[in-house]
Amino acid sequence: MTDFLWGSATAAYQCEGAWHEEGKGLSIWDDYFHSDKCPAHVENGDTASDHYHKFEEDFKMMKEGGQNSYRFSFSWPRIMPDGTGKINPQGVAYYHKMIATMRQYGIEPNVTLYHWDLPLSLHKKGGWENIETAFAFAEYAKFCFHEFGDSVKLWATLNEPFYSLLCMYGSGNYPPNVKDAQRLLHAAYIQMYASALAANEFRKLENIGQLGIVADIHPCYGVDDSEACQFAVQMADHIMNNWVLDTAFKGYFPQQLLDELAKQYDLSFMKEEHRAIFDKGTLDFVGLNYYNRAYIRPYTTGESFVLVNNSGSKNSGIRETGKVKRMMVVKNMFEKIADPNGTFTEWDFEIYPKGIYDAVKMVQKKYGDLPIYITENGIGLHEKLINHTVDDTARISFMQRHIDELPKAKKEGVAVMGYYVWSTFDLYSWINGYDKRYGLVYVDFAHENKRYPKQSYVWYKNFINNWRELYETKYGH
Ligand code: BG6
């Protein structure tokens, strides 16, 4: 493997398309978008970026753009249509072909096993609220480790357990569209158990590479230093970060959080007999998806809630310029607010580059010298194709300012091993549809998904070619 991985990332549902081709089963998202549960104006990922048919063109562009690694996910229902049991040989053949092609272009695969496309059959039996889903995941993971273990050396179990389950069971904007903290906790426990079970399978194999998890990381900052605020920050950090990371790297959930949660919720789903699996299920590396920080103050009043801007317009109610607005409340614990002086994207994500430095330092402090990959970092923009390209200077500035935080951390001994831009090309942004573009490459969704490199693609290519000299001059390494 090359020494530092510079790449970009995607996820199966968001880019592959071919939602019903070559034996693929249905996922919870396919079902949602093809049912009356989904609002009529919401687009779907049926065709998405058509990566399923265009992957070679995409890898060629990655190679020409200087990238040496691709982070992507396997579609669980493409490999196991019902989530367990029967294998779809065409799906397996597809991923073999895709990985072989990637390697021909000198691109190192970094595979995430689950990026939110839960097989529908499992969802119908309770999904992440049913412990059987954890066993099914371990079965699927074991199959993939055996089948692809020769060609894939970097594996991750789950993508963003915190954020995805928050959307599924907290804000209710992702299927199954539930707003229930008790159910959210249960699902969040089962997902971490699924990851640990998969890790137990992985440890039975030799020479198979490394297994990690991809977490959305939210460095937490208090509005002041008061005791109440310190408690709020600690709780926010436990819920947003430590629930996943302590469990994945220390072998169990943070006790202080469990004590607090037990005052409000029924935790009887946590079984003593699972402890050994968690204990033996720790992982080798962490993937951090960094988009923004969490600005925290003590809890004031009202029930728990979370707001997400899926509208694409500024000040859509989630935030008001110059005013403090609560974006997330966890009753009796903390409130996440929008900094009235912060800078925000069109979708109300705060732009806070220093947070990526604080995040990797925090991970090193808590978990030691763990290899860290920045597995996603990027900005969603409204964009237009003009003269066969997109002038995305806002993205270039975003990337430059975030990447610039990393060499200092590396110099201070943090084991940052790679960086992946979200995303390789424009793709489907969940319920934001196609308007929120993240790609280094523009996809013309209306005209056969033709690809056009943006200015950021060119900038990234030049940066990758020169980064050693750049940082040697700046940081002396
Ligand atoms: C991450 C996910 O949360 O952020 C991606 O891993 C997602 O799947 C990305 O697309 C950006 O979020 P969004 O909602 O703007 O598409």
Image (tube, rainbow, N blue to C red):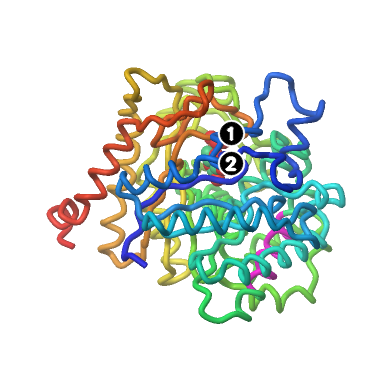
> Helix, strand or loop at disc 2?
loop
Local packing at callout 2 (Cα closer than 10 Å; few below 14, some 14-19, many 20+) is many
Residue bearing mark 2: 16
Q: In the drawing, what numbered circle is on residue 48?
A: 1
Magenta residue check for 198: yes
Q: Quadrant of residue 401?
A: top left
Asked if the residue at label 2 sits under 8 Å from ligand 1, the reply is no
Q: In the drawing, what numbered circle is on residue 95?
A: none
Q: Is residue 125 above or below residue 149?
A: above
Q: Residue at x 76, y 47 (%)?
A: 25
Residue 107 seen: yes
Viewer-side residue, 47 vs 166:
47
Q: Residue at x 23, y 43 (%)?
A: 462
Q: Residue at x 77, y 56 (%)?
A: 83
Q: Residue furthest left?
A: 473
Give the image location of residue 363, x and y in percent: 45, 62
**Quadrant field for ligand 1:** top right
Mark pair 1, 2: CA separation? 6 Å
Viewer-side residue, 181 vs 468:
468
Give the image location of residue 222, x and y in percent: 48, 45
Instruction: Report the magenta stretch's main SS.
Output: helix
How many labels were placed on the picture?
A: 2
What is the magenta range?
188-199
Give the image location of residue 337, x and y in percent: 54, 35
Viewer-side residue, 285 vs 223:
285
Quadrant occupied by the N terminus? bottom left
Q: Is residue 250 above or below residue 418?
A: below
CB atoms of marks 1 and 2 within 8 Å: yes
Q: Quadrant of residue 472?
A: bottom left
